[in-house]
């Protein structure tokens, strides 16, 4: 057997794998924290919007306060997205309900009454 085909493990090979895993995990964590901090600056800019502009995108001042109240490393946009989607779904349901209330109830027509009476 040649020495080229052998794989030798040193005493530090598992340490190297663990260290590289920690570095990769640390890098991912740093990237997440940097994104969360950047999104908090965007959240601060949203605070400069007036109430009408916030309403246009489906948010309120209370939504901004709730999103900002989380820990600094937590991404605040998840709170804002959930609130905006819930509010939009509520408006859609209200429109559907009002349209359903405006529709007249269907009365059986004469043909339906005649065939129903024949049985």
Image (tube, grey):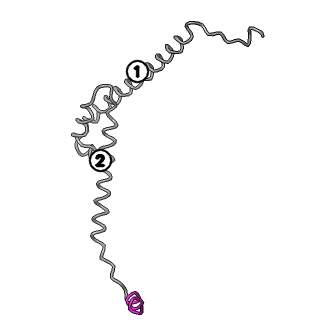
Q: Which mark is residue 56?
A: 2
* Classed neighbour count for the residue bearing mark 2: other residues with Cα under 10 Å, few (<14), some (14–19), many (≥20): few
- Main SS class of the magenta portion in the image: helix
Q: Is residue 102 above or below residue 82?
A: below
Q: Which mark is residue 30?
A: 1
* Classed neighbour count for the residue bearing mark 1: other residues with Cα under 10 Å, few (<14), some (14–19), many (≥20): few
Tell me the element at label 1.
helix
| Residue closer to the observer: 75 or 118 | 118
Q: Is residue 50 left or right of residue 33?
A: left
Q: Which quadrant of the structure image shows residue 32?
A: top left
**Dot in front, 2 or 1:** 1
Q: Are marks 2 and 1 in contact (CB under 8 Å)?
A: no
Q: Is residue 103 above or below residue 9?
A: below
Stretch in magenta: 110-119
Residue at position x 27%, y 65% in the image:
98
Q: Which quadrant of the structure image shows residue 44?
A: top left
Q: Is residue 111 left or right of residue 86?
A: right
Q: Position of residue 114 (x, y in %)?
A: 40, 92
Rendered-image quadrant of the N terminus: top right
Q: Residue furthest top?
A: 11
Q: Which mark is residue 71?
A: none
């Amino acid at each position: 057997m040649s020495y080229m085909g052998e794989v030798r493990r040193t005493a530090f090979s598992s340490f190297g794998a663990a260290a590289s895993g920690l570095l990769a995990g640390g890098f991912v964590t740093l990237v997440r924290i940097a994104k969360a901090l950047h999104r908090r600056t965007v959240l601060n800019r949203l605070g400069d919007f007036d109430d009408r502009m916030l309403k246009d995108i489906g948010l309120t001042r209370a939504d901004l306060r709730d999103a900002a109240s989380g820990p600094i490393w937590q991404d605040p946009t998840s709170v804002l997205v959930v609130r905006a989607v819930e509010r939009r779904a509520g408006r859609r349901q209200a429109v559907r309900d009002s349209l359903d209330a405006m529709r007249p109830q269907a009365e059986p027509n004469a043909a339906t009454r005649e065939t129903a009476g024949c049985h």
